[in-house]
Amino acid sequence: MGRGKIVIRRIDNSTSRQVTFSKRRNGLLKKAKELSILCDAEVGVIIFSSTSKLYDYASTSLKSVIARYKKAKEAGEDHQHNSASEVKLWQREATALRQQLQYLQECQRQLMGEELSSMSVNDLENLEHQLEMNLKGVRMKKDQILTNQIQELKQKENLLHRENLEFCQKIELIRKENSELKEKVYGAMDLNDSSINFIDPCTVSNSYDLDGPISLQLSQPQPHYDELTEREMRLGYLLDLLACYIQS
């Protein structure tokens, strides 16, 4: 069976206390030595007994361990001091920014025409001058934007004008082709009419006597021009559509 758990408190019996001190001191020094060897750590232990007897252990030198401890302690204190100084610095910065924000909000309300009762005549004149300068800058920016828009509209106008000229040229070309087609159609019709006029419109029947009544037969015009007339109508309709598009 293992040992029972010992209550950590002062041992009243001096003999037992001395025995326990000796055992645990040796164990502590042994553990410190093992720690320094296993973990490559610099270890220093200082023990004073109840009778003021000194026991110590150092993996390198107790003096170097104490010097290193003092240096690390001072660095820690400096770091804490620097941290406290940094906190104070940020607090001052936050206060300054809060005051600046309050001042800007007050200026904004004054520019909007509010809270002017506490301002003097000179302050009001300065505010008026500032507003005039701001208004001048706004107008200059507006004029610049309007000028840019006018230039863009002029460019669009020139582009539309060129497109209109191109459409007019196309319409003129179509009109010219239509006119030439009309001349061809009417020329063909005139030739056909002249050839019809040379044909004898009256025929004599052989079954009657020359001295008897003459039977006349009128020849009917033949529909040779239906195809040409339809093409002419289509070209005229296309011309009207293009003219309406240009006007719109």
Image (cartoon, rainbow, N blue to C red):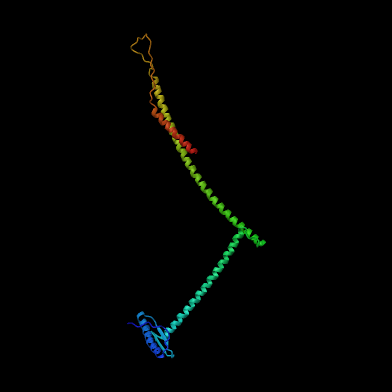
To which quarter of the image does residue 5 belong? bottom left
Numbered disc total: 0
Q: Nearer the viewer, residue 237 or 202?
A: 237
Residue at 43% across, 31% down? 233
Instruction: Say which quadrant the N terminus sits in.
Output: bottom left
To which quarter of the image does residue 69 belong? bottom left
Left or right: residue 112 versus residue 179 is: right
Left or right: residue 111 versus residue 45 is: right
Question: Relative to 226, does residue 112 appear above or below in the rendering?
Answer: below
Q: Nearer the viewer, residue 32 or 241?
A: 32
Q: Residue furthest top?
A: 211
To which quarter of the image does residue 183 belong? top left
Question: Relative to 179, does residue 82 appear above or below in the rendering?
Answer: below
Left or right: residue 151 versus residue 208 is: right
Residue 65: x, y in percent? 42, 83
Q: Nearer the viewer, residue 14 or 230?
A: 14
Q: Residue furthest right?
A: 121
Residue 68: x, y in percent? 43, 82
Residue 194: x, y in percent? 40, 22
Residue at 54% across, 70% down? 91
Residue 134: x, y in percent? 59, 57
Question: Relative to 236, does residue 94 appear above or below in the rendering?
Answer: below
